[in-house]
Image: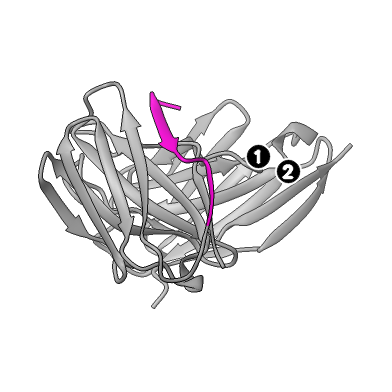
Amino acid sequence: DAGITQSPRHKVTETGTPVTLRCHQTENHRYMYWYRQDPGHGLRLIHYSYGVKDTDKGEVSDGYSVSRSKTEDFLLTLESATSSQTSVYFCAISLAGSYEQYFGPGTRLTVT
Amino acid sequence: QQQVKQSPQSLIVQKGGISIINCAYENTAFDYFPWYQQFPGKGPALLIAIRPDVSEKKEGRFTISFNKSAKQFSLHIMDSQPGDSATYFCAASMGQGGSEKLVFGKGTKLTVNP
């Protein structure tokens, strides 16, 4: 699992509430990513980070924000959760100079 | 617009058979093509990957075949085993390494019957 932990692993929340998912890595990797996985869509990139305080948008960034104040933590925030954000969220890391990405165990989020 | 198209959606193979999953891409700037294996409740795990300067890469029972002119690549699983039953995703990316934005296919659910 490349030293990646995600928390919480499961969460149920109500529409309109803010939600923050945490990705924590222990190996000082520079690059971190957030993906969502939905049936019939594969995995889609939400946001990524290429260093502390350096982030950029991915394919499906609307409704999501991210922050990275420390190398080891990459936070994904849903400011006001909607039912369309019910999904499984995966964090990934890659090593500098490498194409390979390694994924965490995922967070299953249900928005009711 | 889907940049990586994967087929079939599902595949059933007998133990010992060959499993073949195909992907096609559109963007000729892609220069890295990985395959991921995912078991239920787990994150995707990198299985094997190829760069476009080679036509084939083999690791154990898993082989990637790459056809640059056709913009297609495929995963072959030889001597398929029940333990190979999982969902497989192809992907593609471009860049200089380290800040890759992977574009995934929609996945193939493989079932290997004993």
Residue A33 location (% of width, % of height): 30, 46
Query: Mark 2 is on which residue type?
Result: Ile
In this rendering, the count of numbered labels is 2
The reply to whether residue A100 is in sight is no
Answer yes or no: are tags 1 and 2 on the same subunit: yes
The answer to which of A34 and A42 lies nearer the viewer is A34
- Chain letter of mark 1 equals B
Q: Secondary structure at mark 1?
A: strand
Residue B77 disc label: 1
Q: Which residues are magenta?
A: A1-12
Quick check: B11 above or below B27? Answer: above
Q: Quick one: label 1, few (<14), some, or many (20+) residues within 10 Å?
A: many
Task: Choose top left, top right, bottom left or bottom right for residue B112.
Answer: top right
Q: Secondary structure at mark 2?
A: loop
Residue contact at pointers 1 and 2, CB within 8 angstroms? yes
Outermost residue toward the right?
Answer: B114
Query: Mark 1 is on which residue type?
Result: Ile
Residue A35 location (% of width, % of height): 39, 53
Residue at 49% x, 43% y: name it.
Answer: A106
From the viewer's perspective, tell me whether residue B73 is left or right of residue B110.
left
- Chain letter of mark 2 equals B
The reply to whether residue A105 is in sight is yes
Residue at 31% x, 51% y: name it.
Answer: A76
Q: CA distance from mark 1 to mark 2?
A: 6 Å
Which residue position holds label 2?
Answer: B18
